[in-house]
Image (spheres, rainbow, N blue to C red):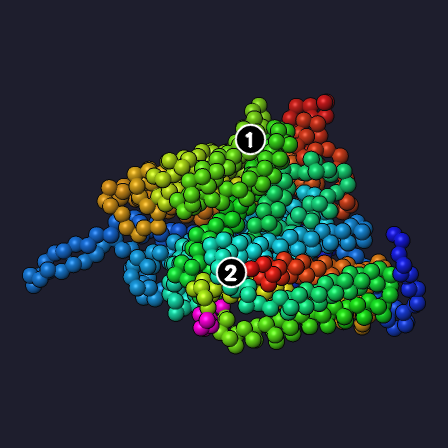
Amino acid sequence: MQTTLDADTTPAPAHIANHPTHWRNRPFAAHFRTRDDDFDASKFGMWLFLTTEVLLFAGIFCAYAVFRMMYPEAWSNGSHHLDWRFGAGNTVVLLVSSWTAASAVRCAQLNKQKWLKINLIITLICAALFLFIKFKFEYSVKLGDGKAPGTFFSYAFAESPYEILWWSLYYMGTGLHALHVVIGGCLLGWVLYRSWKYQAYGPTEYLMVENSALYWHIVDLIWIFLFPLLYLIH
Amino acid sequence: MSSTDHAHHEGESYFDGPPGVLSKVWQWMSTVDHKKIGVMYLVAVLFMFFLGGVSALAVRYELLDPVRTVETMNEAGEMIQYTTGERLAGLTNIMGAKNANEVYNRIFTLHGAIMVFMFIIPSIPASLGNFFLPIMLGAKDVAFPRLNLLSWYIYVIGCLFGVFSILLGGVDTGWTFYTPYSTTTDADHWRVVLMILAAFILGFSSILTGMNFVVTVHKLRAPGMGWFDMPLFIWGVYATAIIQVLATPVVGITLLLLVFERVMHIGIFDPSMGGDPVLYQHFFWFYSHPVVYVMILPGMGIVSELLAVHSRKHIFGYRAIAFSSLGIAAVSFLVWGHHIFTAMGELAAVLFSGLTFLVAIPTAIKVFNWIATLYKGSIAINTPMLYGLIFLFTFSIGGLTGLPLATLATDLHLHDTYYVVAHFHYTMMGGTVMAFMGGLHHWWPKMFGKMYSEKGAMTGTVLVFIGFNLTFFTQFFLGTQGMPRRYANYVDEFQTLHMISTYGSWILLLGFLVHLGTFIVSLIAGDKAPPNPWGGLTLEWETESPPIEHNFHHEPIVTHGPYDFDKVVPPHWDPKDYPLPENPSSH
């Protein structure tokens, strides 16, 4: 494929190049016939897993649709309590992070070890920024107002008795998503640690980078659906 | 003696000598060999079957006679009351229950929850599937061996949550955890949450196993093995794995919402807060209906193997059976509404009823093909074949009795009665468990390298067959006469049938104990199994019994179909073991 990026051919320092975890020294799983089979199988497995993630969130979206139909006014009131600017800001943060995650994969393929790490770090910063915005400007403010899920709901100015359901689904959906952000961050952090310490990923061994990035994209994608459903439509 | 030395010498046999030392235990607990993991699953799954079976026996024991409260006069001339027939009353204090009825409710819940989540869902795919799927594909292992081990540990952790909940007294919500009952009962206690979390955790194990199998089938077939050269057991497990991957996440989120509902009252399933308990039922059955095909499809796969191998006939309608597995998997996602006919509108009920009838088509295709396979075959009457035939008989009853339940008018009369109980036990036990037992006997020599006593196994099989039918056929009558399910008590008219059913459960127990004894004797003193005791043509019969560490000495190349009994001489053919059909190579 034509690319503007050129492969980095700088040799790694000897103590890293000879380490068994360095990407050149990594064997593929012995029960596969070729390295490509191993790679394809693992990536296929990841896609299946991503399918299960989509179906997991499908339950939340389904409940959202049902209750939106049953209590449109509560849903309208609820979404008016959310500030779209924070949601939009977080959307931008996640989109940028998805781009850097994809770039990290490309850098691993081209053996650009430095840019691999830089891209991963930017992704992780975005993950932290997302969680910071979420918790600092949204969760903590709303919880302070009493707009909390279930038994903790104590917001005195609710106009509809069913707003409590809105908040329950809001916290379930975004909370579960935030949990996935944390998991994705851990995966990418692991990739960063290993590329930092061993240069573990390169042109023939970038599966873990790619799978982690795929996971990160699904986290992004789910947010792309959560954002308009919760923040934009009233 | 020399053969044992040989195995030791190679250091590759996974079952070489009695374990006992700690290193041996560690070797098993840390293994990534799919065969050892399959055996570990087998042990765990059979243990859960035992626990679920004990609670089933307790349920039947309580139902031996109706509860009667008798008023009589004692010696002092005072009127006193006493109650007979509360046979589980002795457990009231032990389980911390309010009364004998609550004990009964807890026990049938345990029976359902254990049998569904911990036994029957993982039973065939995780034990026999794990062991044989890679071998039958000609692979060295499943695609992700470490994930495979992880899913076993997750399974065990899930089971521990369940067992812990039982030790704390158990739950009485029914295995379906219907709201609002599951969110309000025993509100001050954690055991319901523990049981729900158990099901949630077991879901992860199921998803990981399913993913592993789908990828293995796609990527690790031996050279020469196209999709339609795969044994039908693989097709069954493959269709199962797809359902596991696609359905389980939905129950995951459902149970998660249920836990939050119970702990924080988020209100989604609570009508007093505007929530909808029927939504829970939709969510739950969106998983739990497809999952009944997770239970039966691998069983159907096993039966395809049993009937073909033990009648030495090419399976009739290979592609029809393979595609009907996928067809069942596809339709399974469209029929969940038939569990809640009365909780939805008329149009939806009619649609779901119609879709439910669709399931009968691929299922019947399979049954007809199996029977056609037997036609003019040289049928060997041994334990696996007997179980195959029992499956045809009991599963057909189970399938056909499902049709009146899919019919809206008759379902109004039959739903929530013993008729339903009998129906699903005929499919789940008469289908899956019979196939599982048949598969276990069929592959026992391969898994453990020992033959079992055919006499002992046949005795067990006959006892299981008689016990099973006594236990459950009576329940069809009970149900049509109006005996509701999940009741600890009943009117006197039902007693005869209930007694027959309970006696049947004891015969069933006896049958399984005979099987257990046969297996133990086989492990201790069984004859060494030849590589191919039945003359099978699938790849697992080409390697030793038990298979070596990476299954094959050389990567097998598939040159014939799995059922070409009329064209190919079976590998490791020994005329002492089984006769060949006439002119095997003349075609």
Camera-near label (2 vs 1) is 2
Residue B322 location, quadrant: top right
In reply to whether residue A154 is colored magenta, the answer given is: yes
Q: Residues within 10 Å of mark 1 (few under 14, many from 20)?
A: some
Most extreme residue toward the left is: B77
Quadrant of the snapshot with the C terminus of chain B:
top right
Amino acid, disc 1 = Ile
Residue shown at the point (90%, 59%) measured from the top left: A4
Helix, strand or loop status at disc 1: helix
When the figure is inspected, residue A15 is found, relative to residue B424, above or below; the finding is below
When the figure is inspected, residue B210 is found, relative to residue B366, above or below; the finding is below
Residue shown at the point (14%, 56%) measured from the top left: B71
Instruction: Judge from the rendering whether residue A207 lies leftward or rightward of residue B391; answer left or right.
Output: right
Q: What residue is pinned by disc 1?
A: B365
Q: CA distance from mark 2 to mark 1?
A: 48 Å
Residue shown at the point (71%, 65%) measured from the top left: A92
Q: Position of residue B126 (x, y in %)?
A: 59, 51
Q: How many marks are shown on the rendered structure? A: 2
Residue B310 location, quadrant: top right
In reply to whether residue B230 is colored magenta, the answer given is: no
Q: Please, which chain is the residue tagged with disc 2 on?
A: A
Front residue (pair A108, B446): A108
Q: What residue is pinned by disc 2?
A: A75
Helix, strand or loop status at disc 2: helix
Q: Please, which chain is the residue tagged with disc 1 on?
A: B
Q: Which residues are magenta?
A: A149-157
